[in-house]
Amino acid sequence: MAGSKCRASAETFNTDLNLSFEDGLIYMLQEVLTDQLKDLLHAENQLVKALPKMAKAAKDEHLKSAFTDHLEQTKGHVERLKQAFEMLEEPAKAKVCTGMAGLVEEGSEVIEEGKELDAVAADLGLIAAAQRVEHYEIAAYGTSAKFAESIGREDVAELLSQTLEEEKEADQLLTQITQPLLDAASGQGAEPETEEAGTRRSR
Ligand SMILES: [Fe+2]
């Protein structure tokens, strides 16, 4: 049973560190939280490198801007994670995030495949890859914020929730950008704005 396993682990910390059961549990949860943050730090660092490639590959101007804007936000997410480590008095050490590595790899494949496709199909592929990334991050930040809250670290939970909200907004923006592309693909909408068309519209 998960509950009894958790208790056993807390008791291990109890014995090793001579803590009360409650303090042992908090110590254990902080270890779990820190591990999540290390994983997220590596995930965000990978995105800082991947997003410029996504922006370069995007044909639709709104999609290109969404990737460029999210790159700036992502740099802020890295800073928030470093701040969270500081608040928890833990070293800001990244741990390889194989989940994000896989998603970034898929993104690279989509960029390559998109070179053979028309602009709308290529952009829809990029959106699909980017929304997978956002959902992955939403899961990770949601869980981490909950863990922080459970150990009474509302300050850390608040910080992580700010990023969580930005990830959700980024995901919603991608959904908004999708509709005109789908309309264009089905011949129902106006031509999407591309760099080549030189029809930059304010967002
Ligand atoms: Fe992020």
Image (spheres, rainbow, N blue to C red):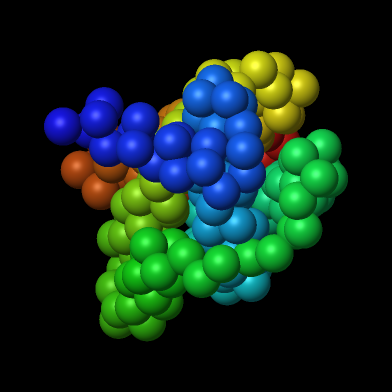
In this view of the protein, can residue 121 be seen by the observer? Answer: yes
Residue drawn at the location 71% of the way across and 36% of the way down: 202
Can you say which quadrant of the picture contains the N terminus? top left
From the top left corner, tell me how far across and down residue 50 is, in percent: 57, 69
From the top left corner, tell me how far across and down residue 74 is, in percent: 68, 51
> How many marks overall?
0
Note whether 92 is above or below 164 in the view shown: below
Residue drawn at the location 81% of the way across and 45% of the way down: 89
Can you say which quadrant of the picture contains the C terminus? top right
Residue drawn at the location 75% of the way across and 58% of the way down: 92
Camera-side residue: 47 or 142?
A: 142
Camera-side residue: 145 or 12?
A: 12
From the top left corner, tell me how far across and down residue 46 is, in percent: 58, 68
In this view of the protein, can residue 180 be seen by the observer? Answer: no
From the top left corner, tell me how far across and down residue 148 is, in percent: 60, 27
Note whether 78 is above or below 180 in the view shown: below
Residue drawn at the location 25% of the way across and 48% of the way down: 185
Q: Is residue 96 left or right of residue 52?
A: left
Q: Residue 20: name its quadrant.
A: top right
- The furthest residue to the left: 1
Q: Is residue 155 left or right of residue 183?
A: right
